[in-house]
């Protein structure tokens, strides 16, 4: 018998070898091998291979056997069978998702099959399994329930995955992971994932380097395989194969997900459907990616969430003359669009930082706790490389904020296309970024520039991202490479969001305002004693907006007691709603204007 078993193993091994060469093997039966054992083995293997397809037939046979046994030995048990059947069907409908029946139609199909089987068994126990018309009902019911089972997409996918992974020893040998083995596999809506135990001496990094070979061996499309380490064991990994890209289409932004800077903002969705949440409180953030990769969309999502928080003030720096950040002007307390304005703004941020640090030291506290009356300050810089080239003074201030701003809740969010050490300056800005978002990059070496040294080797492959909006995030709570896609917030959505949140933006706290005023030269009063007109905002371009600024102030000063509406101010000045709100906020912080009611403003009455 041992000799026969050895011969069969040799035949199977030789058959696999010649089949890989494209030759279909022929089974030769010699005189020293018995036909019956080979036939039994062949039939058993075929039944096991097609066990999923044969499940309806197996269920029908077990149903018939159960009816025979109950009618013979326990014919009075039919009420109990009916009761158990009804309870099980109800449980499947209500709790079926706990056993991976995620869709309502799947739970309904399972409950219907249970009711049919249980009802037939109860009737057969009471009347006999071969009583007319029970045999016909069993045959017709078996056929009707078999068709949905055979056609079910996820069942067919599970069978295909099981047969693919059954060849894992050959696949592992082909890609250089000999000795690794599959521990478990799960089929989900988008593909499947398998838990793999590596052989002794193999590492997750070894498997990551062989992803292209794995995709070829598994027969998947290019770029569909993901490998994630399992933190509990160094010799374990999760292989995920995406057969249907869940991020093929854009995902509409559902609206702000936070009401405080102390809550983690929601940037997008991972491939498994879970949200991408990250905290920006006391954390500097870096957003990188080539032009057209979705970097600006990610910045819009950050601004959309932060603008809904009444305990954070947002300043912006956009040296592209405000092309990216100007639509958010009504929600930005300050916006710098020239190098001179950028240096002034960053210097003022450092002054606020120093003022808050002095106040905390006087009161014996270590951190600044954001509140609506003591908001955090976030300075968002679009295309940081331009700041390095055109405003070196602002870069020095940014370096100071990166080093000292966390405790006092003064943080940076910088966006750039290629954050090299030269582009980010020679200071500490790049090294102090705790949160890093990498959209698609053009070169492999740019992965390490954005996410950190050694991240490419560890599986952070943002150079393979294949659609705008897809990104990888590295943060203290996200230390495993998982692909995600940010939400889509179009221009109309930006306008609606900024208009809605502009009236609720908080004023600067007294400590920060005092520190800021100490660095601002005091304007002299006019010699005739008349009220001085307010100076234009720091981010205004005098040549283009001075006339509109004068018209705005005149309209506010001559407004009736119930104020003037935003629409009237837009008509008088010829400017957009975001510009109007931005100027009103500037005047309100200086106590020159007041909001009489929602959407109506006027100048502060003279004492």
Image (tube, rainbow, N blue to C red):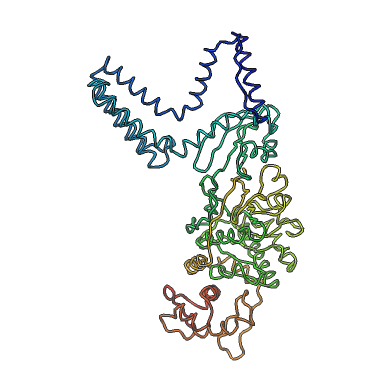
- Where does the image place residue 577, in percent across and percent down from the top left? 51, 75
- Which residue is painted at 53% across and 61% down in the image? 489
Left or right of residue 276: residue 92:
left
Closer-to-camera residue (513/205): 205
Left or right of residue 381: residue 590:
left
- Where does the image place residue 228, in percent across and percent down from the top left? 61, 39
- Which residue is painted at 65% across and 56% down in the image? 286
Give the quadrant of residue 57: top left
Closer-to-camera residue (440/454): 440
Q: Is residue 339 above or below residue 49?
A: below
Give the quadrant of residue 23: top right
Q: Is residue 119 above or below residue 208?
A: above
Q: Is residue 521 above or below residue 455?
A: below
**Is the N terminus in the top left, top right, bottom left or bottom right quadrant?**
top right
Closer-to-camera residue (525/126): 126
Give the quadrant of residue 80: top left
- Which residue is painted at 59% across and 91% down in the image? 528
Left or right of residue 154: residue 3:
right
- Where does the image place residue 269, in percent across and percent down from the top left? 53, 50
């Amino acid at each position: 018998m041992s000799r026969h078993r050895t011969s069969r193993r040799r035949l199977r091994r030789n058959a696999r070898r010649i089949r890989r060469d494209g030759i279909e093997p022929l089974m030769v039966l010699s005189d020293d091998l018995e036909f019956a054992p080979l036939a039994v083995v062949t039939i058993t293997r075929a039944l096991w291979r097609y066990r999923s397809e044969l499940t309806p037939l197996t269920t029908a046979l077990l149903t018939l056997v159960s009816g025979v046994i109950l009618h013979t030995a326990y014919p009075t048990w039919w009420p109990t069978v009916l009761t158990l059947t009804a309870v099980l069907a109800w449980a499947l409908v209500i709790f079926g998702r706990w056993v991976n029946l995620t869709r309502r139609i799947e739970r309904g199909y399972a409950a219907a099959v249970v009711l049919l089987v249980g009802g037939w068994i109860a009737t057969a126990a009471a009347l006999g399994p071969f009583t007319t018309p029970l045999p016909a009902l069993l045959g017709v019911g078996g056929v009707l329930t078999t068709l949905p089972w055979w056609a079910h997409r996820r069942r067919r996918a599970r069978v295909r995955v099981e047969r693919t992974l059954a060849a894992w020893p050959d696949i592992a040998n082909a890609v250089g992971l000999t000795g690794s083995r599959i521990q478990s596999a799960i089929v989900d809506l988008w593909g499947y994932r398998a838990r793999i135990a590596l052989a002794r001496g193999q590492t997750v990094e070894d498997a990551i380097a062989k992803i292209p070979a794995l995709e070829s061996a598994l027969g998947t499309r290019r770029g569909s395989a993901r490998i994630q380490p399992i933190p509990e064991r160094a010799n374990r990994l999760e292989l995920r194969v995406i057969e249907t890209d869940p991020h093929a289409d854009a995902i509409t932004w559902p609206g702000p997900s936070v009401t405080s800077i102390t809550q983690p903002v929601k940037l997008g969705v991972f491939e498994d459907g879970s949200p991408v949440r990250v905290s920006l409180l006391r954390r500097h953030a870096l957003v990188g990616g080539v032009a057209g990769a979705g970097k600006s969309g990610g910045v819009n999502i950050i601004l959309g969430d932060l603008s809904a928080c009444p305990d954070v003030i947002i300043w912006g720096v956009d040296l592209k003359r405000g092309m990216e950040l100007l639509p958010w002007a009504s929600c930005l307390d300050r916006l710098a669009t020239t190098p001179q304005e950028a240096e002034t703004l960053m210097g003022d941020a450092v002054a606020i930082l120093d003022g808050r640090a002095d106040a905390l030291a006087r009161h014996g506290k270590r951190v600044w706790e954001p509140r609506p009356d003591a908001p955090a300050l976030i300075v968002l810089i679009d295309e940081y490389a331009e700041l390095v080239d055109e405003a070196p003074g602002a870069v020095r201030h940014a370096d100071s904020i990166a080093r000292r701003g966390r405790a006092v809740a003064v943080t940076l969010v910088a966006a750039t296309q290629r954050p090299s050490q030269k582009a980010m300056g020679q200071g500490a800005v790049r090294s102090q970024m705790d949160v890093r978002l990498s959209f698609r990059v053009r070169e492999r070496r740019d992965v390490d520039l954005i996410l950190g040294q050694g991240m490419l080797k560890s599986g952070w492959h943002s150079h393979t991202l294949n659609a705008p909006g897809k990104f990888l995030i590295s943060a203290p709570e996200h230390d495993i490479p998982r692909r995600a896609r940010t939400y889509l917030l179009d221009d109309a959505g930006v306008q609606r969001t900024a208009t809605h949140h502009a009236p609720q933006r908080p004023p600067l706290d007294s400590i920060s305002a005092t520190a800021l005023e100490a660095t601002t030269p005091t304007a002299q009063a006019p010699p005739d004693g008349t009220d001085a007109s307010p100076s234009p905002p720091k981010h205004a371009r005098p040549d283009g907006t001075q006339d509109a600024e004068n018209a705005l102030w005149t309209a506010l000063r001559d407004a009736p007691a119930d104020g003037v509406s935003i629409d009237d101010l837009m008509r008088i000045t010829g400017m957009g709603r975001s510009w109007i709100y931005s100027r009103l906020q500037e005047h309100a912080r200086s106590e020159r204007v007041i909001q009489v009611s929602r959407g109506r403003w006027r100048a502060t009455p003279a004492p």
